[in-house]
Image (tube, rainbow, N blue to C red):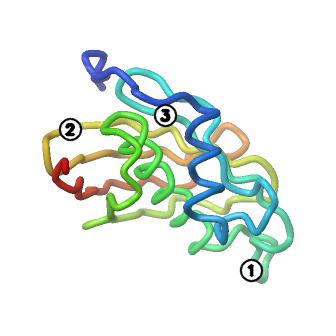
Amino acid sequence: MPVQTALTPVMTVAEINELLAKIYPQLNDGLRFYEAVEVFPGGCTVRLNADERHLRPGNTVSGPSLFTLADIGGYVCVLSHAGPDALSVTTNLNINFMRKAPAGQIDGHCRILKLGKSLMVFDIDIVADGQTVAHATGTYSIPPKR
């Protein structure tokens, strides 16, 4: 699929992680479960370092944990490309679970499909052990510039 190379990030990975820790401290509770690992033109990569807290019976990472990773991917994309306005919010998020996700490193490869003045549409491929475990599409609302 084509990448939106015409889109230029306005924040770095370090700035994104610092902002997330400041505006959304409850996400990681002082640890590094969810984090941005890469920001590039038109997208980002986010990671869930899943441990026993993220497991449901059967030793599989829970759906809500993977859903959170998908939502964080969209949030990192909108912050890194539209600017650090913490009031950007999810307006839609659809997810399909493909297979069991084991504990450990789970990466979300997020791509901006469209970035407008008030909305950003994205998709994210969630990968564990080299296989897609979930795929999501979503939309973020971008607040008007003040």
**Relative height, residue 109 to residue 140 (above, below):** above
Question: What's the amino acid at mark 2?
Answer: Leu
Question: Going from the N terminus, do you reach mark 2 or mark 3 first?
Answer: 3
Question: What's the amino acid at mark 3?
Answer: Cys
Q: Disc 1 to disc 3, how far (Cα)? A: 27 Å
Relative depth, front residue between 34 and 137: 34
Q: Position of residue 48 (x, y in %)?
A: 69, 53
Q: Position of residue 109 (x, y in %)?
A: 51, 38
Question: Going from the N terminus, do you reach mark 2 or mark 1 first?
Answer: 1
Relative depth, front residue between 105 and 80: 80
* Residue beneath the point at 37% across and 36% down: 111
| Tag 1 residue | 56
From the viewer's perspective, tell me whether residue 105 is left or right of residue 116: right
Q: Are marks 2 and 1 in contact (CB under 8 Å)?
A: no
| Tag 3 residue | 44
Q: Quadrant of residue 36?
A: top right
Q: Position of residue 23 (x, y in %)?
A: 55, 61
**Relative height, residue 13 to residue 104 (above, below):** above
Q: Are marks 1 and 3 in contact (CB under 8 Å)?
A: no
Characterize the local packing of mark 1: few (<14), some (14-19) or many (20 or more) Cα atoms within 10 angstroms: few
* Residue beneath the point at 30% across and 26% down: 1
Characterize the local packing of mark 3: few (<14), some (14-19) or many (20 or more) Cα atoms within 10 angstroms: many
Question: What's the amino acid at mark 1?
Answer: Arg
* Residue beneath the point at 58% across and 53% down: 20
Can you tell which of label 2 and label 1 is closer to the viewer?
A: 2
* Residue beneath the point at 65% across and 55% down: 21
Relative depth, front residue between 129 and 51: 51
| Tag 2 residue | 115
SS type, badge 2: strand
**Relative height, residue 142 to residue 36 (above, below):** below
